Image (cartoon, rainbow, N blue to C red):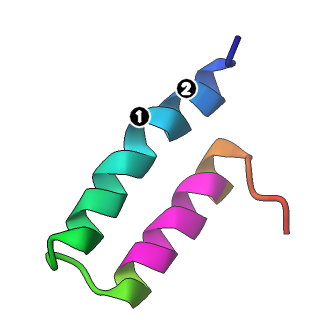
Amino acid sequence: MFDEKEREWQLAKPIIDRLFKEGIISFDEWYFMILSLRKKLGLLTI
């Protein structure tokens, strides 16, 4: 079972991906949003 942070990641990632695929945000914005969200949730493994 996912903890709360992992659950939030599972909900937000497809939304961010859809924004990129539909051309609403650029690749740079998509990449920054993904890294920022993972850092905020404490899931960044770099």
Residue under numbered circle 1: 11
Q: Are marks 2 and 1 in contact (CB under 8 Å)?
A: yes
Work out whether residue 40 or residue 7 is closer to the camera in this orientation and state it.
Answer: 7
Q: Residue at x 61, y 20 (%)?
A: 4
Q: Is residue 31 magenta?
A: yes
Residue under numbered circle 2: 7
Q: Residue at x 44, y 49 (%)?
A: 13
Q: Within 10 Å of the Cα at label 1, are there few (<14), some (14-19), or many (20+) other Cα atoms?
A: few
Q: Is residue 44 left or right of residue 35?
A: right
Dot 2 falls on a residue whose secondary structure is: helix
By secondary structure, the bulk of the magenta-drawn segment is best described as helix
Q: Residue at x 73, y 48 (%)?
A: 43
Dot 1 falls on a residue whose secondary structure is: helix
Q: Locate residue 16, reporting x and y percent.
A: 34, 58
Between marks 2 and 1, how big is the CA–CA gap? 6 Å
Q: Is residue 7 above or below residue 19?
A: above
Q: Locate residue 41, reporting x and y percent.
A: 63, 43
The amino acid type of the residue labelled 2 equals Arg
Quadrant hosting residue 23: bottom left
Q: Which residues are magenta?
A: 30-38
Q: Is residue 32 magenta?
A: yes
Q: Is residue 4 left or right of residue 25?
A: right
Work out whether residue 21 or residue 43 is closer to the camera in this orientation and state it.
Answer: 21
Q: Locate residue 44, reporting x and y percent.
A: 75, 58
